[in-house]
């Protein structure tokens, strides 16, 4: 995932916009990498708990997919990234339910570091 700083730098590198720009994409490419396992059972439980409690909305910005789109949708964020801890036991309290936009921003670096849910909420409310 590209950081906010890298994305901004990339955008700033483009001095002129070419409205006729064409690039080749979509070729198949074999990519091999290690990925941390996620257990979908706890994520499903977290979402079910929120749905049953009427709290299926973003913990950062309060956006509700149910209210806006009549869809029971939300993403689940590990408050302390698994990449930082490695293998561990995860509890429901280790997870936060967030909308897609906020989830993306929680995984973007600001001034070289990731924001907490509280910090991102404060940034949105400025």
Image (spheres, grey):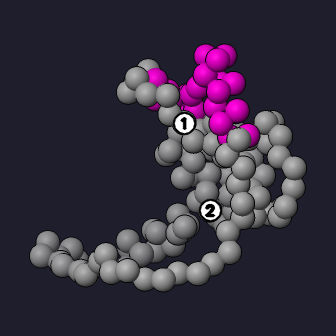
Q: Above or below — where is 37 with respect to 58?
A: below
- Locate residue 74, reporting x and y percent: 54, 36
Q: CA distance from mark 2 to mark 1?
A: 22 Å
The residue at 57%/48% (across/down) is 103
> What is the quadrant of residue 10 in the picture?
bottom left
CA neighbours of label 2 inside 10 A, class few (<14), some (14 to 19), many (20+):
some
How dense is the environment of label 1, judged by Cα within 10 Å: few (below 14), some, or many (20 and up)? many
5 in magenta: no
- Residue situated in front as seen by the camera: 23 or 113: 23
Numbered tag placed on residue 109 in the rendering: 2
Of the pair 43 and 8, the residue shown nearer to us: 43
Q: Which residues are magenta?
A: 42-66
- Residue that numbered label 1 is attached to: 74
**Would residue 70 appear left or right of 1 to someone viewing this image?**
left
At 58% from the left and 25% from the top, the residue drawn is: 56
Asked whether, in this view, residue 70 is left or right of residue 97, the answer is left
Q: Quadrant of the C terminus?
A: top right
């Amino acid at each position: 995932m590209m950081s906010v700083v890298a994305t901004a730098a990339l955008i700033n590198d483009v001095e002129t916009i070419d409205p006729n720009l064409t690039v080749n994409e979509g070729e198949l490419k074999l990519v091999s990498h290690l990925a941390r396992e996620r257990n979908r059972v706890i994520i499903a439980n977290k979402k079910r708990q929120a749905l049953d409690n009427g709290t299926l909305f973003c913990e950062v910005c309060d956006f509700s997919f149910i209210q806006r789109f009549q869809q029971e949708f939300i993403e689940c964020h590990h408050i302390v990234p698994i990449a930082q801890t490695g293998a561990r036991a995860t509890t429901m309290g280790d997870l936060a339910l967030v909308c897609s936009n906020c989830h993306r921003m929680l995984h973007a670096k600001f001034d070289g570091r990731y924001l907490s849910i509280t910090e991102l909420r404060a940034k949105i409310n400025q």
